[in-house]
Image (spheres, rainbow, N blue to C red):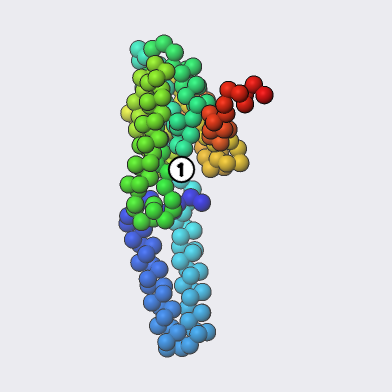
Amino acid sequence: MKNPFRTEAEAFSFVLVCAVLFAAVAAAGALGGGWVALGVFLALGLGITVGIYMKSEPKVREAAVWERGGARRCILVVANETVAGQALRMEIVHRAQGEAEVLVVCPALNSPLRHWSSDEDRARAQAQSRLDTSLAALAEEGIEARGAVGDADPLQAIEDALRTFGADEMIISTHPPGRSNWLEKGVVTIARELYPIPIAHVVVDLVHEREGAEQTPGDAER
């Protein structure tokens, strides 16, 4: 479910509306009884729902404009929980051969409750930890990459990165179909529609990679 609250002001407004709603219902119940309270609740609830629906128009995205054609190829990598996956690392190494500048952006995954309460510190810390692991693994492969923790919305994270990083190509990494929230939201498809650069989609199966890492040489021979 897409989080409707992007700012502290929106979260505070939501809490304030709820407080007013429950206060009105409590007052109606005290003055007119249960049926009156129910009627007030339904009427106000319907009004609030309609108001939120009218304000929640689909976001119109305008693709970022950036300059390309520098001396080095610039590769933008966008990944969240899969950022340290082996399949993604191999793809980056393959594409970054030669003179290439790599920027790895890891959107800060957060729960709706924590986002509504503007508590993003934990999400950003976890994203930074995954990002550090990924950058260290790339360094072992001889790839010098830099990283950044991005917006929780992957498309917004891409937009923010492209305004300061002139990417020539992009790699988006997701979980396999059926387990990927990004694929359900059409992140890869939308990105390909917005940005006129090659965009590779890498599927990382972390469960399969962990099982492969735990397998012993003897098991592999059998």
Residue visible at 46% across and 88% down in the picture: 32
Residue visible at 39% across and 53% down in the picture: 114
- Read off the residue under disc 1: 60
Horizontal side of residue 179 vs 111, given as left or right:
right
Q: Amino acid at mark 1?
A: Val
Horizontal side of residue 177 vs 77, given as left or right:
right
Residue 94 position within the rendered picture, expressed as x and y whole percent measured from the top left? 49, 17
Please tell me whether residue 52 is drawn above or below residue 215 in the rendered image.
below
Please tell me whether residue 23 is drawn above or below residue 55 in the rendered image.
below
Residue 81 position within the rendered picture, expressed as x and y whole percent measured from the top left? 46, 37
Question: Residue 212's quadrant in the figure?
Answer: top right
Quadrant for the C terminus in the image: top right
Q: Is residue 167 visible?
A: no
Classed neighbour count for the residue bearing mark 1: other residues with Cα under 10 Å, few (<14), some (14–19), many (≥20): few
Residue visible at 44% across and 13% down in the picture: 97
Please tell me whether residue 22 is drawn above or below residue 52 in the rendered image.
below
How many numbered discs, if any?
1
Q: For mark 1, give the secondary structure.
A: loop
Horizontal side of residue 127 vs 49, given as left or right:
left
Residue visible at 46% across and 66% down in the picture: 48
Q: Is residue 153 visible?
A: yes
Residue 73 position within the rendered picture, expressed as x and y whole percent measured from the top left? 40, 16
Residue 154 position within the rendered picture, expressed as x and y whole percent measured from the top left? 44, 38
- 114 or 156, which lies in front? 114
Question: Residue 11's quadrant in the figure?
Answer: bottom left
Name of the residue lying farthest toward the right: 222
- 88 or 28, which lies in front? 88
- 174 or 166, which lies in front? 174
